[in-house]
Amino acid sequence: MSSTLAIPLPAPMPVRPEVGARKCATTGLNVCLTAEKFIKLTAVSAVVFLLLGGIAAILLALTRWQAVHLLPVDWFYRILTFHGLNMLIFWILFFEVAVLYFTCTTPLNARLFSAKVAWAGFIQMIVGAVMVDYIILAGKADVLMTSYLPLVAHPLFYLGIILVATGTLTGVFNFFATLYVAKRDRTYEGSLPLVTYGATAAAIIAVVTLLHGAIVMIPTFTYAMGWTAQPDPMWYRMIWWGLGHQSQQVNVAAMVAIWYLIGNLTTGAKPLNETVCRAAFVLYILFINLASAHHLLVDPAVGSAWKIWNTSYAMYLAVLASMIHGFTVPASVEFAMREKGYTKGLFGWVTHLPWRNPAFSGALLSLLIFGFIGGITGVTLGTQQINIIAHNTLRITGHFHATVVGGTSLAFMALTYYVIPLIFRRNFIWRSAARAQPWMFGGGILLVSLGMSFAGSMGVPRRIYDIDHSGAFGPAAHLMLGVMGIGAILAAAGLFLFCILCVGTLLFGEKTGNRAMADWGVAQALAGSREGSLADDHWAVKGTIALTAVFLASFAVYYFANWKALADVWPVR
Amino acid sequence: MNNETNKHWLQRLLDNIWLLLVLGVLIPFLSYTVWGWIEIALVRPAQMP
């Protein structure tokens, strides 16, 4: 285990007595005990919010599945608000703070900058999140996650979001301060390890995101209190999406960093060219946040130049970054497998991948769902002209369930299969169920995303309680809503199983103490194979090149089909 | 110190997280927020018929 981890991370240095660290029996790396405490706190909180959001998810899916139509109308919008905030904001931000605290300490052999700052951030976040959830369930904030003005919620709703934002910013400050101290004290040599670099990209994006959150929520809070006039609704929408969409870009950077980490942990993969990977993260930092403009493509107050420039991620440079990562991660895995001796044909190495390792299968499914479904639909729907036939339909929801849930959430779940044994020092219970969990969740979300996307293609709107009253939707649309509902049941089962596994392990899992964690299974080298044997082989990743060709062909077909659909509904004569 | 000065300029840029932090905040604020804010501010209020 330590031999694979040592590839991208600096060699562990001796633990300094004042640091307050322990040596990990599995990786050989030093773990800061203060960071470990806050990783535990934020990760457990994240899983609690995931569970709450998951319960809401199944209630919503069984309501949008028109044949079931479970919730009454007022509870539908209440639970929709609850679901959005718990899944898109709380689960993600809490887990990301855990990722930040891990990546700025253990890989750098550093200590967390300040326990007091960490407490200040965590308390703000948890108080804010509980406040928001309480106000929503009390029926005083039926404004959906976006809370578009002139809808007004109880002031505590906005105050809670402000607290979550400032708490997360406090955690991000702790992350940057830790990086500064680690560099000053020379706890590591050379560049930041790639996983820390990716987390740094996420943290920079988070700064922009959370500043937008503060800019939009503070005047809305004072308005809800009756202290100031109502902010302009169009201004509100623009600044709000600087929070709402950009927070999902934080996820993308963190998710990619996790792909690299898990690829290394499970197969020994290291990036083919680390400089290119870092440059791709820089493209994220500079350009990915512009994409918030997607949400305003039908708003009248901003012009076409602003829309096209910003939705292009500055002419698709951030998309290029995603494609670099989407190629490099599987290519580095293929390269590592071929160096281990699995050289047969284009895809002979695929069958020898550690599929029984839930971290590996989760990360790979995350990459495939994010790239093939989320990426292709995202760039297409973000095109101004095509957006006009997709805006506010379930296609949008289908897209972001592929990116945020199938991509980010699944990657976070995958990482948890290492976080709990390494940080909480307990081996997972019910390991056979754990091996199946990513497939259940990933398969379910795939059906959810496809069901929503096809229903949306037939015009089914998002955020609508009842589509039957219009009589506009035939059996095909209802069939797709059924596919979505069945997928949601499967995904919810996978999510609840994940929560049971996590909580069960924390309560009943075998303590590892100073022993290495139980191995999930990693790729093994064949006899006679040698690291570095393929250094001059320019076709060593030909399987990934073939997959990339399939990806690009799928992209072209989908993009063309959408222009055709646009031409059909809006013919030019 | 020598290692730092011997680095390729692109590598030094990639390693300078503070510069990336400034650029990462500045570019989206200018391109998305400030530009968008100006466009919204220039919209004239509709006249009632």
Image (cartoon, coloured by chain):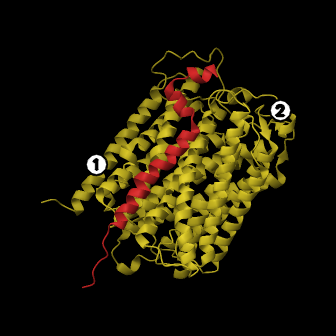
Mark 1 crowdedness (10 Å alpha carbons): few <14, some 14-19, many ≥20: few
Nearest the viewer among A267 and A295 is: A295
Across and down, in percent, residue A490 comes to 58, 59
Q: Quadrant of residue A454?
A: bottom left
Q: Tell me if residue A317 comes above or below residue A116 in the rendering.
A: above
Mark 1: which amino acid?
Phe
Question: Chain ID for label 1?
Answer: A
| B6 on left or right of A346 | right
Q: Position of residue A136 (x, y in %)?
A: 61, 75
The amino acid beneath tag 2 is Val
Q: Secondary structure at mark 1?
A: helix
**Taking A239 as reference, is B20 above or below it?**
above
| Residue placed most toward the observer, A565 or A430 | A565
> Chain for mark 2?
A
Label 2: element kind: loop
**Residue A141 location (% of width, % of height):** 57, 77
Chain A appears in which tint? Answer: yellow
Residue A23 found in image quarter: top right
Position of A301 relative to A520 (above/below): below
Give chain B's shade: red
Q: Residue furthest bottom?
A: B49
* Quadrant into which the C terminus of chain A falls: bottom left
Q: Look at discs 2 and 1 and give the one toward the viewer.
A: 2
- Seen at 29% across and 51% down, the residue is A561
A375 lies left or right of A366: left
Which residue lies under the disc numbered 2? A15
Residue that appears at 61% across and 73% down:
A157
The label shown at residue A560 is 1
- Residue A241 makes an appearance in the image: yes
Q: Going from the N terminus, do you reach mark 2 or mark 1 first?
A: 2
Indicate the quadrant containing the N terminus of chain A: top left, top right, bottom left or bottom right: top right
